[in-house]
Amino acid sequence: MKKLVAYITTGFPDVNFTIDLACALKDSGADILELGVPFSDPVADGAVIEEANLKALKNGFRVDDIFTVSKEVAKNIETYWMGYFNPFYHKGMDYFSAKALSLGVSGFIIPDLPYEEAQPYKQMLNGMGLNLIDFIAPTDSADRVKKIVENASGFIYLVAYAGITGSGKNEDLSQISKIVKNHSDTPLFVGFGVDETSAKAKVKYADGVIVGSAFVRTLLDESLTGGEKIAKISALADIIKSVINE
């Protein structure tokens, strides 16, 4: 069965809501949870996730909030912390890795940490039983893909197109997926621009999809109550999980 990875912005609109939403996503078919660490300059994210990041920070998000959420949800669903390198560097990877281990978190997703610079951290984390997720893109050469994925753990994040999240572009992922499969048994998940209309096509050559903007867009809808937001996002997760497994 192909998997659904769900990204949500931690602490938006508040911590208790994030916990409730995470539990609802698990019940609606999400297999893995990405808890986004709000940051003021999320360079790989589009306007939707950027707005949620800024609103979470304005509402008083603190790094400890991601620990509070993880304590409640990581025991029930495989959980990763997704964030930019600045907060991890500022607090220290030792600090975050110790917290992750104590809370049952599986690892980190840091999109602005280049592969070469990530290697010392990756070795440290792998030695502790944690994963640092590797990214590849359709523009990577076959040699570079082989180099990146040979020692990948957790899952491999295939960026569906060059650009930012949520822009809905389409590229042929067949060749890049074939190269990955030839060099790694680690699950391959496709992210960027995935929603209920694109998920089936994007998952064709992969083991699952990563959905973020499609969920966060509902978080930003101020016409909905908290309960309505959770219900709408849960319904969307259920649809996407069904579509990718048709």
Image (cartoon, rainbow, N blue to C red):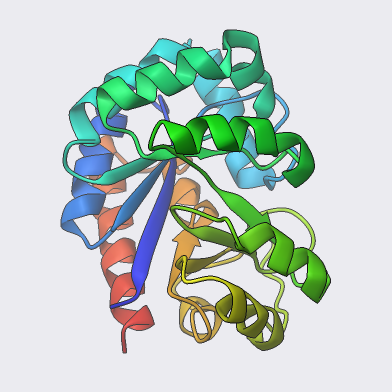
In the rendered image, residue 187, in percent from the top left (x then y), is placed at: 45, 67
Whether residue 125 appears in this view of the structure is: yes
Identify the residue shown where x is 31% and y is 72%: 241
Quadrant showing the N terminus: bottom left
Q: Between 17 and 162, which is closer to the camera in this rendering?
A: 162
Quadrant showing the C terminus: bottom left
In the rendered image, residue 57, in percent from the top left (x then y), is placed at: 55, 17
48 left or right, relative to 81: right
Identify the residue shown where x is 56% and y is 79%: 181
In the rendered image, residue 190, in percent from the top left (x then y), is placed at: 55, 67
219 left or right, relative to 105: right
Q: Between 184 and 29, which is closer to the camera in this rendering?
A: 184
Whether residue 83 appears in this view of the structure is: no
34 left or right, relative to 54: left
In the rendered image, residue 25, in percent from the top left (x then y), is placed at: 25, 51
Whether residue 185 is situated above or below residue 46 in the rendered picture = below
Q: Between 207 and 185, which is closer to the camera in this rendering?
A: 185
Identify the residue shown where x is 62% and y is 24%: 39
148 left or right, relative to 99: right
How many marks can you see? Answer: 0
Q: Quadrant of residue 70?
A: top left
Whether residue 66 is situated above or below residue 187 in the rendered picture = above
Whether residue 235 is situated above or below residue 231 in the rendered picture = below
